[in-house]
Amino acid sequence: METLLKEKTNPREVTHLMVGREIEKVDVSAKRSAGEIVLEVENLWLPWPSHARNWRLQDISFSLRKGEILGIAGFMGAGRTELLECIFGASKEIPRGHIRLEGNPVAFRHPNEARRAGIAMVTEDRKRRGIFADMSVRENISICTLHKALRNGLVNRTKERKLVGEMLYSLRVRTATEEATITSLSGGNQQKTIIGHWLLTNPKVLLLDDPTRGVDVGAKAELYQLMDSLCRDGIAIILTSSELPELLTVCDRILVLSEGSLTANFHRSEATEEKIMEAATLDAMAITNAQH
Protein backbone atom coordinates (compact mmCIF):
# COMPACT_ATOMS: atom_id res chain seq x y z
CA MET A 1 0.00 0.00 0.00
CA GLU A 2 1.19 3.51 -0.78
CA THR A 3 -0.08 6.94 0.24
CA LEU A 4 0.19 9.83 -2.22
CA LEU A 5 -0.53 13.53 -2.03
CA LYS A 6 -3.30 14.44 -4.44
CA GLU A 7 -1.45 17.41 -5.90
CA LYS A 8 1.67 15.30 -6.53
CA THR A 9 0.13 12.40 -8.41
CA ASN A 10 -1.97 11.74 -11.52
CA PRO A 11 -4.46 9.13 -12.79
CA ARG A 12 -1.74 7.19 -14.65
CA GLU A 13 0.35 6.73 -11.49
CA VAL A 14 -2.66 5.76 -9.37
CA THR A 15 -3.77 3.22 -11.97
CA HIS A 16 -0.28 1.73 -12.13
CA LEU A 17 -0.23 1.29 -8.36
CA MET A 18 -3.70 -0.31 -8.40
CA VAL A 19 -2.94 -3.00 -10.97
CA GLY A 20 0.82 -3.34 -10.60
CA ARG A 21 1.64 -2.61 -14.26
CA GLU A 22 1.48 0.13 -16.86
CA ILE A 23 -1.89 0.43 -18.58
CA GLU A 24 -1.95 1.01 -22.31
CA LYS A 25 -3.94 4.02 -23.43
CA VAL A 26 -7.19 2.75 -24.90
CA ASP A 27 -8.46 4.33 -28.08
CA VAL A 28 -11.45 2.68 -29.72
CA SER A 29 -12.75 5.89 -31.26
CA ALA A 30 -11.76 5.01 -34.83
CA LYS A 31 -14.91 4.72 -36.93
CA ARG A 32 -16.24 1.22 -37.54
CA SER A 33 -18.27 0.32 -40.62
CA ALA A 34 -21.42 -1.59 -39.69
CA GLY A 35 -22.64 -4.15 -42.20
CA GLU A 36 -26.02 -5.66 -42.92
CA ILE A 37 -28.64 -6.27 -40.24
CA VAL A 38 -27.95 -9.54 -38.42
CA LEU A 39 -30.50 -9.41 -35.59
CA GLU A 40 -33.97 -7.84 -35.41
CA VAL A 41 -36.22 -7.62 -32.37
CA GLU A 42 -39.78 -6.47 -33.01
CA ASN A 43 -42.57 -5.76 -30.49
CA LEU A 44 -40.99 -7.89 -27.77
CA TRP A 45 -43.04 -8.29 -24.59
CA LEU A 46 -41.98 -10.34 -21.57
CA PRO A 47 -44.66 -11.25 -19.00
CA TRP A 48 -43.95 -10.97 -15.30
CA PRO A 49 -46.95 -12.67 -13.65
CA SER A 50 -45.44 -12.79 -10.19
CA HIS A 51 -45.32 -8.99 -9.99
CA ALA A 52 -48.04 -6.39 -9.65
CA ARG A 53 -47.28 -5.17 -13.18
CA ASN A 54 -48.15 -7.43 -16.10
CA TRP A 55 -45.02 -6.89 -18.18
CA ARG A 56 -41.31 -7.07 -17.43
CA LEU A 57 -40.45 -5.81 -20.95
CA GLN A 58 -42.88 -3.78 -23.00
CA ASP A 59 -42.95 -3.42 -26.79
CA ILE A 60 -39.18 -3.47 -27.44
CA SER A 61 -38.03 -3.09 -31.06
CA PHE A 62 -34.53 -2.58 -32.45
CA SER A 63 -32.02 -3.96 -34.95
CA LEU A 64 -28.33 -4.88 -34.72
CA ARG A 65 -25.87 -4.75 -37.59
CA LYS A 66 -22.82 -6.87 -38.29
CA GLY A 67 -19.68 -5.23 -36.88
CA GLU A 68 -21.63 -2.95 -34.53
CA ILE A 69 -21.61 -2.54 -30.75
CA LEU A 70 -25.09 -1.72 -29.48
CA GLY A 71 -25.20 -0.54 -25.87
CA ILE A 72 -28.10 -1.06 -23.47
CA ALA A 73 -28.34 1.51 -20.67
CA GLY A 74 -30.73 1.76 -17.75
CA PHE A 75 -30.89 1.60 -13.98
CA MET A 76 -30.94 -1.66 -12.06
CA GLY A 77 -34.30 -3.30 -12.69
CA ALA A 78 -34.80 -1.59 -16.05
CA GLY A 79 -34.78 -4.95 -17.87
CA ARG A 80 -31.29 -5.02 -19.42
CA THR A 81 -30.46 -8.61 -18.43
CA GLU A 82 -33.98 -9.82 -19.18
CA LEU A 83 -33.73 -8.47 -22.72
CA LEU A 84 -30.53 -10.42 -23.40
CA GLU A 85 -32.02 -13.54 -21.84
CA CYS A 86 -35.03 -13.31 -24.17
CA ILE A 87 -32.73 -13.20 -27.19
CA PHE A 88 -30.60 -16.07 -25.85
CA GLY A 89 -33.51 -18.35 -24.98
CA ALA A 90 -32.69 -18.17 -21.27
CA SER A 91 -35.83 -16.40 -20.02
CA LYS A 92 -37.97 -18.33 -17.55
CA GLU A 93 -41.11 -16.84 -19.08
CA ILE A 94 -41.85 -17.15 -22.80
CA PRO A 95 -41.57 -13.74 -24.47
CA ARG A 96 -44.01 -12.49 -27.08
CA GLY A 97 -43.04 -10.74 -30.26
CA HIS A 98 -40.65 -11.47 -33.11
CA ILE A 99 -36.91 -12.12 -33.24
CA ARG A 100 -35.12 -12.60 -36.57
CA LEU A 101 -31.55 -13.78 -37.04
CA GLU A 102 -30.14 -12.97 -40.47
CA GLY A 103 -33.71 -12.45 -41.65
CA ASN A 104 -34.99 -15.81 -40.38
CA PRO A 105 -37.58 -15.97 -37.56
CA VAL A 106 -36.25 -17.65 -34.39
CA ALA A 107 -37.88 -18.50 -31.07
CA PHE A 108 -35.24 -20.07 -28.86
CA ARG A 109 -36.51 -21.98 -25.84
CA HIS A 110 -33.07 -22.98 -24.55
CA PRO A 111 -29.58 -21.41 -24.75
CA ASN A 112 -28.35 -24.50 -26.62
CA GLU A 113 -30.64 -23.58 -29.51
CA ALA A 114 -29.27 -20.04 -29.54
CA ARG A 115 -25.69 -21.31 -29.41
CA ARG A 116 -26.22 -23.62 -32.38
CA ALA A 117 -27.76 -20.71 -34.33
CA GLY A 118 -24.76 -18.47 -33.68
CA ILE A 119 -25.62 -16.44 -30.57
CA ALA A 120 -23.43 -16.40 -27.46
CA MET A 121 -23.97 -14.74 -24.08
CA VAL A 122 -21.54 -13.78 -21.32
CA THR A 123 -23.66 -13.49 -18.19
CA GLU A 124 -23.55 -10.77 -15.57
CA ASP A 125 -22.96 -13.20 -12.68
CA ARG A 126 -19.56 -14.59 -13.61
CA LYS A 127 -18.99 -16.67 -10.48
CA ARG A 128 -22.42 -18.30 -10.35
CA ARG A 129 -23.36 -18.62 -14.01
CA GLY A 130 -20.25 -17.97 -16.07
CA ILE A 131 -17.52 -20.35 -14.94
CA PHE A 132 -17.17 -23.97 -13.91
CA ALA A 133 -15.34 -23.25 -10.67
CA ASP A 134 -13.95 -26.76 -10.11
CA MET A 135 -12.59 -27.10 -13.63
CA SER A 136 -9.37 -25.95 -15.27
CA VAL A 137 -8.88 -23.04 -17.63
CA ARG A 138 -8.60 -25.54 -20.50
CA GLU A 139 -11.84 -27.27 -19.60
CA ASN A 140 -13.71 -23.99 -19.19
CA ILE A 141 -12.70 -22.85 -22.67
CA SER A 142 -13.26 -26.09 -24.57
CA ILE A 143 -16.39 -27.46 -22.87
CA CYS A 144 -18.83 -26.30 -25.58
CA THR A 145 -16.63 -27.16 -28.55
CA LEU A 146 -15.07 -30.53 -27.73
CA HIS A 147 -16.40 -31.82 -31.06
CA LYS A 148 -13.66 -29.74 -32.74
CA ALA A 149 -11.03 -31.88 -30.97
CA LEU A 150 -12.53 -35.28 -31.78
CA ARG A 151 -10.51 -38.01 -33.43
CA ASN A 152 -12.16 -41.36 -34.08
CA GLY A 153 -14.99 -40.42 -31.75
CA LEU A 154 -12.73 -39.54 -28.82
CA VAL A 155 -11.41 -36.19 -27.59
CA ASN A 156 -7.84 -35.74 -28.74
CA ARG A 157 -6.08 -33.82 -25.98
CA THR A 158 -3.39 -32.54 -28.33
CA LYS A 159 -6.00 -30.96 -30.63
CA GLU A 160 -7.92 -29.63 -27.63
CA ARG A 161 -4.83 -28.01 -26.13
CA LYS A 162 -3.97 -26.47 -29.48
CA LEU A 163 -7.43 -24.87 -29.74
CA VAL A 164 -7.26 -23.64 -26.16
CA GLY A 165 -3.67 -22.43 -26.45
CA GLU A 166 -4.46 -20.36 -29.53
CA MET A 167 -7.43 -18.76 -27.76
CA LEU A 168 -5.41 -17.99 -24.61
CA TYR A 169 -2.71 -16.36 -26.73
CA SER A 170 -5.21 -14.41 -28.83
CA LEU A 171 -7.02 -13.00 -25.79
CA ARG A 172 -3.81 -12.50 -23.77
CA VAL A 173 -5.13 -14.49 -20.83
CA ARG A 174 -2.59 -14.43 -18.01
CA THR A 175 -2.34 -17.88 -16.46
CA ALA A 176 0.59 -19.97 -15.28
CA THR A 177 -0.78 -22.97 -17.16
CA GLU A 178 -3.97 -23.96 -18.95
CA GLU A 179 -4.39 -26.68 -16.31
CA ALA A 180 -4.75 -24.13 -13.50
CA THR A 181 -8.21 -23.95 -11.95
CA ILE A 182 -10.10 -20.99 -13.36
CA THR A 183 -10.70 -19.55 -9.88
CA SER A 184 -6.94 -18.99 -9.55
CA LEU A 185 -7.14 -16.32 -12.24
CA SER A 186 -7.94 -12.66 -11.68
CA GLY A 187 -11.45 -11.44 -12.41
CA GLY A 188 -10.39 -9.93 -15.73
CA ASN A 189 -8.64 -13.09 -16.90
CA GLN A 190 -11.63 -15.19 -15.85
CA GLN A 191 -13.81 -12.93 -17.98
CA LYS A 192 -11.52 -13.26 -20.98
CA THR A 193 -11.56 -17.03 -20.51
CA ILE A 194 -15.37 -17.02 -20.59
CA ILE A 195 -15.36 -14.90 -23.74
CA GLY A 196 -12.85 -17.33 -25.28
CA HIS A 197 -15.17 -20.21 -24.41
CA TRP A 198 -17.90 -18.55 -26.49
CA LEU A 199 -15.65 -17.35 -29.32
CA LEU A 200 -14.76 -20.97 -30.08
CA THR A 201 -18.43 -21.46 -31.03
CA ASN A 202 -17.94 -18.89 -33.86
CA PRO A 203 -20.86 -16.62 -32.87
CA LYS A 204 -22.51 -14.13 -35.19
CA VAL A 205 -23.95 -12.21 -32.23
CA LEU A 206 -22.22 -11.81 -28.85
CA LEU A 207 -24.31 -10.69 -25.87
CA LEU A 208 -22.21 -9.15 -23.08
CA ASP A 209 -24.07 -8.49 -19.84
CA ASP A 210 -22.03 -5.99 -17.78
CA PRO A 211 -18.78 -7.78 -18.72
CA THR A 212 -16.37 -5.46 -16.88
CA ARG A 213 -18.16 -5.71 -13.56
CA GLY A 214 -15.68 -6.61 -10.80
CA VAL A 215 -12.52 -6.36 -12.92
CA ASP A 216 -9.63 -3.92 -12.52
CA VAL A 217 -9.03 -0.92 -14.74
CA GLY A 218 -6.29 -2.70 -16.67
CA ALA A 219 -8.54 -5.62 -17.55
CA LYS A 220 -11.29 -3.17 -18.56
CA ALA A 221 -8.96 -1.54 -21.06
CA GLU A 222 -8.10 -4.93 -22.54
CA LEU A 223 -11.77 -5.90 -22.78
CA TYR A 224 -12.58 -2.63 -24.59
CA GLN A 225 -9.86 -3.38 -27.12
CA LEU A 226 -11.13 -6.94 -27.49
CA MET A 227 -14.70 -5.77 -28.20
CA ASP A 228 -13.43 -3.33 -30.81
CA SER A 229 -11.33 -6.03 -32.46
CA LEU A 230 -14.21 -8.54 -32.53
CA CYS A 231 -16.48 -5.94 -34.17
CA ARG A 232 -13.89 -5.21 -36.83
CA ASP A 233 -13.82 -8.95 -37.51
CA GLY A 234 -17.57 -8.81 -38.20
CA ILE A 235 -19.14 -9.99 -34.93
CA ALA A 236 -22.18 -8.02 -33.77
CA ILE A 237 -22.20 -7.16 -30.05
CA ILE A 238 -24.91 -6.10 -27.62
CA LEU A 239 -23.37 -4.67 -24.46
CA THR A 240 -25.11 -3.81 -21.21
CA SER A 241 -23.28 -1.82 -18.57
CA SER A 242 -23.99 0.01 -15.35
CA GLU A 243 -21.22 2.49 -16.24
CA LEU A 244 -22.26 5.19 -18.69
CA PRO A 245 -18.68 6.25 -19.59
CA GLU A 246 -18.07 2.65 -20.67
CA LEU A 247 -21.03 2.68 -23.06
CA LEU A 248 -20.03 6.08 -24.41
CA THR A 249 -16.48 4.81 -24.99
CA VAL A 250 -17.14 1.64 -26.97
CA CYS A 251 -20.69 1.71 -28.41
CA ASP A 252 -21.85 2.82 -31.85
CA ARG A 253 -25.44 3.26 -30.62
CA ILE A 254 -27.04 3.22 -27.18
CA LEU A 255 -30.59 2.14 -26.33
CA VAL A 256 -32.05 3.24 -23.01
CA LEU A 257 -34.52 1.19 -20.96
CA SER A 258 -36.73 2.49 -18.17
CA GLU A 259 -38.96 0.09 -16.24
CA GLY A 260 -38.96 -2.36 -19.14
CA SER A 261 -39.71 0.16 -21.90
CA LEU A 262 -37.41 1.51 -24.59
CA THR A 263 -37.22 5.26 -23.99
CA ALA A 264 -34.37 6.40 -26.27
CA ASN A 265 -32.08 5.37 -29.10
CA PHE A 266 -28.92 7.47 -29.39
CA HIS A 267 -26.19 7.43 -32.01
CA ARG A 268 -22.68 7.63 -30.59
CA SER A 269 -22.22 11.18 -31.85
CA GLU A 270 -25.28 12.52 -30.00
CA ALA A 271 -25.20 10.49 -26.77
CA THR A 272 -24.22 12.15 -23.49
CA GLU A 273 -24.47 11.06 -19.88
CA GLU A 274 -27.12 13.72 -19.29
CA LYS A 275 -29.33 12.57 -22.17
CA ILE A 276 -29.04 8.92 -21.14
CA MET A 277 -29.86 9.69 -17.50
CA GLU A 278 -32.89 11.73 -18.55
CA ALA A 279 -34.18 8.88 -20.74
CA ALA A 280 -33.51 6.32 -17.99
CA THR A 281 -35.78 8.21 -15.58
CA LEU A 282 -38.72 8.76 -17.93
CA ASP A 283 -42.13 7.48 -16.89
CA ALA A 284 -42.16 4.25 -18.89
CA MET A 285 -45.89 3.63 -18.35
CA ALA A 286 -46.80 7.05 -19.76
CA ILE A 287 -44.63 6.36 -22.82
CA THR A 288 -46.29 2.97 -23.40
CA ASN A 289 -49.77 4.51 -23.13
CA ALA A 290 -48.82 7.27 -25.56
CA GLN A 291 -47.53 4.73 -28.10
CA HIS A 292 -50.85 2.87 -28.04
Image (spheres, grey):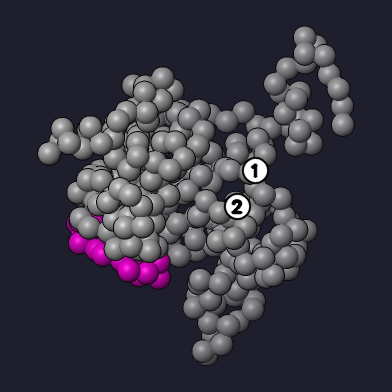
Determine if residue 208 is in view. yes
Residue at mark 2:
191
> Could you say which is closer to the camera, residue 273 or residue 216?
273
- Residue 75: give x, y in percent of width and height: 44, 36
> Could you say which is closer to the camera, residue 231 or residue 86?
86
Residue 264 highlighted magenta (yes or no): no
Element under disc 2 = helix
Residue 101 highlighted magenta (yes or no): yes
Q: Please indicate whether residue 31 sits to the left or right of residue 59 in the image.
A: right
Q: At 49% across and 78% down in the image, what residue appears?
A: 147
Q: Residue furthest left?
A: 292
Given the image, on which type of amino acid does mark 1 rest?
A: Val
Element under disc 1 = loop
- Residue 93: give x, y in percent of width and height: 33, 62
Local packing at callout 1 (Cα closer than 10 Å; few below 14, some 14-19, many 20+) is some
Please state the total of marks drawn on the protein image. Answer: 2
- Residue 203: give x, y in percent of width and height: 40, 59
- The magenta span reads 98-116
State which quadrant residue 35 falls in.
top left
Can you say which quadrant of the picture contains the N terminus? top right
Given the image, on which type of amino acid does mark 2 rest?
A: Gln
